[in-house]
């Protein structure tokens, strides 16, 4: 009997695969997760396993289990299998591999897939010391901290190729756990959005909620602006504070940074007269937050770089600011102040150095003059979740005229 064409094709495939099996090189499958390996609690995720042609069955194995987690027939293309998880929880978090069964044997297991669930615990707080705006060639320390006794913190950077770094936490006498990630010498490639997570050592794939995003910006060598305050450096408790950033350079925007804070205030520039650009930053009543050290920066719409920082401006509060909450609403118990300790690992260019304790963020609203009541700034809206602070401002034409309103932290124009 003459063999048919399908029979000859199958025979040729079997011989080819058989040769690979004898040589011990049967192609191992590829394993990946969509939309990604970091999955928010109760969100869906799909795990894909892709093998070789004529795979008859796919097995998904979870580390720590003696038997396959799932067994599925391939899809119509005969080379892939789809494993769906409708609601992600810590039950599904772990390390996975897959393999397939062919007519002539069993493949080697795939490379490991680390499936992580986020949102299992309260989020940590991420801040930049001394500021989220860093001069090119300078150094900065990203600090992740929490009142939960996490064993480790993970710092992640968004981008086409997501990066992450892990450090063991340091426990301090006041009860906070913390990790310091030194970054530097800084180049424009360090610019981006960072978040951090905490987790416990016995459950490395079960992470906390992500911290609020921190945008790390790099300043260039253009002329530094001046930072002024009409009220003076020493403020009385309850007095309203406004800072003014100005420059003889025609900047399109200005940013105000407070040392130890995690976010930036940004404001479009305006021209009170030809050859002068400036912006006012109303910070509200100083009784609502302690003093601190501020710097401002100028920027152009067509560049992602900021200017060199202004000289620092120190604001002191007389007779107030006691028992203030720490950044992100974390209130420490009574005890000695926290002093960061050196870390021996960093993103690039180690700079283990002590730094002052983090300061509270800037207030998120501004008072109505004469009323003492806090209200939202007219013309501003809450910033969308995940929107980058550096992208708040839209290009606008500068011209002499009334000063634009400057949005509070967490809002956009």
Image (cartoon, grey):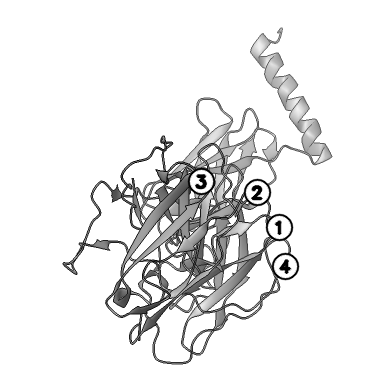
Q: Which x, y percent locates residue 129?
A: 56, 69
Disc number lying in front (4 or 2): 2
The residue carrying mark 2 is 188
The residue that appears at 71% across and 60% down in the rendered structure is 185
Marks counted in the figure total: 4
> How far apart, in angstroms, are the residues tagged by discs 3 and 4?
31 Å
Label 4, label 2: how many angstroms apart (C-alpha)?
Answer: 17 Å
Residue 274: quadrant of the picture: top left
Which residue bears the numbered disc 4? 350
Residue 362, percent from left and from top = 38, 66
Q: Earlier in the sequence, mark 2 or mark 1?
A: 1
Q: Choose the circle earlier in sequence order: 3 or 4.
A: 3
User: Would you say 219 lies left or right of 395 here?
Assistant: right
For disc 3, the marked residue is 36
Q: Which mark is residue 104?
A: none
- Residue at 83% of width from left, 38% of height from top? 23
Closer to the chain start, of discs 4 and 2, is 2
Of 13 and 240, the residue lying toward us: 240
Disc 2 element? helix
């Amino acid at each position: 009997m003459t063999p048919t064409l399908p029979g000859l094709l199958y025979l040729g495939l079997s011989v080819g695969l058989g040769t690979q099996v004898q040589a011990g090189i049967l192609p191992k499958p590829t394993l990946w997760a969509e939309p990604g390996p970091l999955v928010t609690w109760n969100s869906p995720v799909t795990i894909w396993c892709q093998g070789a042609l004529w795979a008859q069955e796919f097995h998904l194995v979870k580390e720590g289990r003696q038997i396959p987690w799932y067994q599925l027939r391939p899809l119509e293309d005969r080379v892939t299998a789809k494993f769906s998880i409708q609601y992600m929880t810590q039950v599904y978090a772990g390390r996975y591999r897959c393999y397939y069964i062919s007519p002539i044997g069993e493949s080697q297991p795939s490379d490991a897939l680390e499936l992580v669930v986020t949102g299992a615990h309260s989020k940590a707080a991420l801040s930049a010391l001394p500021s989220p705006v860093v001069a090119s060639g300078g150094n900065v320390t990203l600090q992740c901290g929490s009142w939960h006794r996490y064993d480790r913190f993970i710092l992640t950077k968004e981008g086409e190729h997501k990066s992450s770094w892990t450090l063991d936490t340091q426990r301090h006498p006041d009860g906070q756990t913390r990790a310091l990630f030194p970054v530097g010498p800084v180049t424009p490639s360090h610019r981006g959005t960072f978040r951090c997570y905490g987790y416990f050592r016995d459950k490395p794939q079960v992470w906390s909620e992500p911290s609020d995003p921190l945008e790390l910006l790099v300043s260039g060598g253009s002329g530094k602006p001046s930072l002024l305050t009409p009220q003076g450096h020493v403020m009385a408790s309850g007095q309203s504070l406004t800072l003014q950033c100005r420059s003889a350079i025609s900047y399109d925007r200005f940013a105000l940074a407070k040392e130890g804070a995690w976010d930036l205030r940004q404001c479009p520039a305006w021209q009170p007269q030809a050859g002068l650009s400036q912006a006012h930053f109303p910070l509200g009543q100083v009784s609502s937050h302690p003093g601190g050290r501020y710097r401002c920066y100028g920027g152009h719409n067509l560049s992602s770089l900021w200017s060199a920082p202004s000289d620092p401006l120190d604001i002191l509060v007389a007779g107030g600011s006691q028992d203030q909450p720490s950044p992100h609403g974390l209130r420490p118990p009574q005890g000695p102040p926290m002093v960061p300790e050196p870390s021996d690992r960093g993103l690039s260019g180690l700079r283990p150095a002590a730094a002052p304790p983090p300061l509270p963020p800037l207030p998120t609203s501004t008072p109505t003059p004469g009323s003492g009541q806090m209200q939202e700034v007219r013309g501003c809206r809450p910033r969308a979740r995940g929107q980058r602070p550096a992208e708040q401002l839209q290009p606008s034409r500068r011209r002499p005229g009334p000063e634009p309103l400057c949005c509070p932290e967490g809002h956009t124009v």
